Image (cartoon, grey):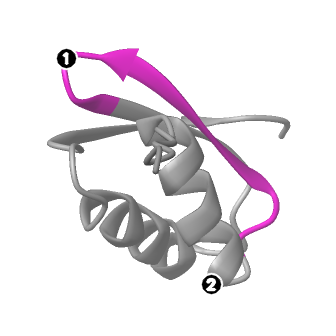
Amino acid sequence: MTKKTTTTSVADRVQNSLYRYGFETISAIDLGDQTVELRGLTESANDLAIAVAIARTVPGVVRVAYQREGH
């Protein structure tokens, strides 16, 4: 029997977690060195804080950067 292994990138895992909590307008990019950058728009500073906290709970993420897009 062959064991099938699937590896999901850190950015994909962060993105999936963000989607689960309703943050469809934020994308995650793996910058390497256990750092993920979140890009997009949030409704408020509280939403941004929640998105960053969600990203930090993903195994393999040590640092989270944020780049606001748009106005």
Extreme residue in the front direction: 1
Q: Which amino acid, mark 1?
A: Asp
Which label was assigned to residue 45?
Answer: none
> Where does the image place residue 57, in percent across and percent down from the top left?
26, 68
Question: Residue at the spot x=47%, y=80% of the render?
Answer: 46
Residue 19 sits in quarter: bottom right
Check residue 31 for magenta coloring: yes
Q: Which residues are magenta?
A: 23-35
> Where does the image place residue 39, in percent across and percent down from the top left?
64, 38
SS at badge 1: loop
Most common secondary structure along the magenta stretch = strand
Left or right of 44 in this view: 26? right
Instruction: Tell me whether the residue at label 1 lies in contact with that at label 2, contact meaning CB atoms closer than 8 angstroms.
Output: no
Evaluate whether residue 21 shows in this view: yes
Quarter of the picture holding the C terminus: top right
Evaluate whether residue 66 shows in this view: no
- The answer to which of marks 1 and 2 sits earlier in the sequence is 2
Q: Which amino acid, mark 2?
A: Tyr
Left or right of 23 in this view: 46? left
SS at badge 2: loop
Check residue 14 for magenta coloring: no
What is the spatial separation of the Cα atoms under label 1 and label 2, in whole angstroms?
A: 25 Å
Residue 67 vertical position relative to residue 15 in the rendered view, above or below: above
Mark 2: few, some, or many residues within 10 Å (few <14, many ≥20)?
few
Question: Residue at the spot x=26%, y=59% of the render?
Answer: 56
Q: Which residue is identified by label 1?
A: 33
Residue 65 sits in quarter: top left
> Where does the image place residue 7, in percent across and percent down from the top left?
46, 38
Residue 48 vertical position relative to residue 6 in the rendered view, above or below: below
Q: Which residue is identified by label 2?
A: 21
